[in-house]
Image: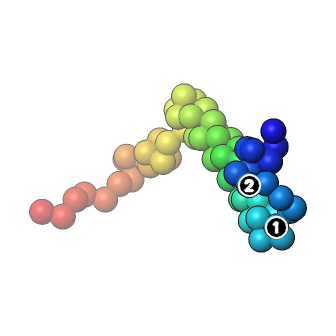
Amino acid sequence: MAKALLGYVGGSDPRVLSEMRRLQQRVQDLESELIRMQAENDALTAAAHRGDSLLDSIDVSKAEPALA
């Protein structure tokens, strides 16, 4: 069954094994990146719901007038 899934019958080809390891590593890297980005997105979403904003830190009474 496993040989049929790989698409060939015969011994293990080192090139195929190498490519499979490279692809497995790439999948792990992408999964790690996805987890990191989901955590970052969750933090940004939480900050948006709390109302944290750069605009809140601006003191309007001390702001300089806009140039005409």
Of 39 and 54, which appears nearest the observer?
A: 39
Q: Amino acid at mark 1?
A: Asp
Residue where numbered disc 1 is placed: 13
Residue where numbered disc 2 is placed: 8
Q: Earlier in the sequence, mark 2 or mark 1?
A: 2
* Position of 3 relative to 46 (above/below): below
Of 20 and 25, which appears nearest the observer?
A: 20
Mark 1, Cα crowd under 10 Å, few <14 / some 14-19 / many 20+, is: few
The image quadrant where one finds the C terminus is bottom left
Q: Look at the image and name its color scheme.
A: rainbow
* Residue at screen point 74% across, 55% down: 8
Image coords of residue 18 (percent x, y):
80, 68
Image coords of residue 5 (percent x, y):
73, 44
> Answer yes or no: do the residues labelled 2 and 1 have beta carbons within 8 Å?
yes
Image coords of residue 26 (percent x, y):
71, 59
* Position of 46 relative to 41 (above/below): above
Q: Is residue 61 left or right of residue 40?
A: left
Image coords of residue 12 (percent x, y):
86, 62
